Amino acid sequence: MLQNITTSQTIKPTTLDEKIERYLHDIFEKELQAKGSILVSYTPFVIKKIAAYLSGRIKMPASIGIAGETASGKSTITMDLIDTIESFAAEFDIKDAITRVNTDDYYYDRSEMVKAAGSFSEFAKNYDLDVPQALELELMHKHIKELLSGKETYLPKYDMSGTAKRFDNHTLAKPSKIIISEGLFTLTEKVKDAFDFKIYVEIDEKIKKDRFYVRAKERDLGDSADIIYKNANEKADVYIKPCKKQADIVLSGSADRIKYKNFLNKIIAVIHELYFSEI
C-alpha cells in the first residue's frame, strides 16, 4: 500500500505475494485466537488482497470503509489506525500516506429545522438521523472516487455540536495511498462499492449503551436520549447490522485500544521486513 518505499530485491510478484500471505495469515490467526482479540472474523480473500497491495502488484491507492452501530468504537479505531500509519510514514519519510473521509460530514444541512424546533433535542424527536437517507452518500462516493483517481477534492464539514449545519467545500483533501472512512452507513448500498476493504465493528450491547449515554450527555440531548437510542437500535437492525455479512474483516469494538495499534504494527513490521530487510 505504501508504494514509494523502494527495494533492490528482484522477486516474482506471485512468489512475493505468497510469502506475504503466509506472514499475514500467521498474524491474523494468532490474533484471532488471542484472549481479548480485536478480531471477530475475517475472510481468507482479504489476506490475498492485502498481500497484493503490500507486494506492489496492485499499484492503485487502497480505500478502507469502516462501519458499525452507534458508539461501537469505529471512529476511535479509525483514528488509532490513522495515527499508527502516520507515525510509520513520518519515520520513513513516506508522503501522502493516508486521507480520512468522515461519513458523518455528509449529513444534510438541517440547521434551519433545528432553529425552527428551538433546540437540537427537539429537532431530533421528529427527524430521523439514523437512516442512510439523512446523508448525501452519493456525494461521498464521488469524493472517494476522485481521491482514488488522484484528484484533490473539497470535503464538507458537519457541525456535530447540535446546530445540524453542514459547511460544503470546507476541507481540502489530497490523494494518498490509503483513503479511509468510517460511519454508521459507510458500507450501505450507495457508497459501499467505493471501498477496496470493508470492515465492520461489532460491539457488546451494554458497552454500546454506556458509551451512547455518555455521548448524549455531552451533546445535551436531554430527555430525547432514550427516544434516539431506541430508534438507533431499531434502524441499526435494518441498515447497519446487515453490513456485517459483506465485511472482509469484523473487529471487536470492545477490545483494548492498544491492541488495535499492536496488531497494525505487526502488519507494518511485514512492510519493514519486506523492504528494509530480506524476507
Image: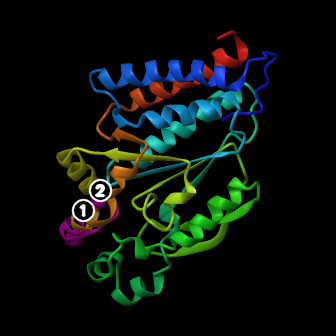
Q: Can residue 84 be seen by looking at this rendering? A: no
Q: Which region of the structure is painted magenta?
A: 215-231
Q: Main secondary structure of the magenta part?
A: helix
Left or right position of 35 against 93: left
Q: State the residue position of label 2.
A: 241
Left or right, 36 with respect to 273, comes to left
**What distance separates the C-alpha of mark 2 from that of mark 1?**
5 Å
The residue indicated by pointer 1 is 237
Residue 26 in percent (x, y) is at: 44, 18
* Residue in the foreground of this view, choosing between 166 and 56: 56
Residue 226 occupies quadrant: bottom left
Q: Amino acid at mark 2?
A: Lys
Residue 222 to residue 266: above or below? below
x and y, in percent, of residue 71 in the image: 32, 52
Q: Amino acid at mark 1?
A: Asp
Q: Hey, which quadrant is residue 123 in on the image?
A: bottom left
Task: Kindly identify the residue that appears in the image at 73 percent across and 21 percent down.
Answer: 12
Q: Quadrant of residue 160?
A: bottom left
Dots 2 and 1: beta carbons under 8 Å?
Answer: yes
Instruction: Say which of 209 and 220 sits in front.
Output: 209
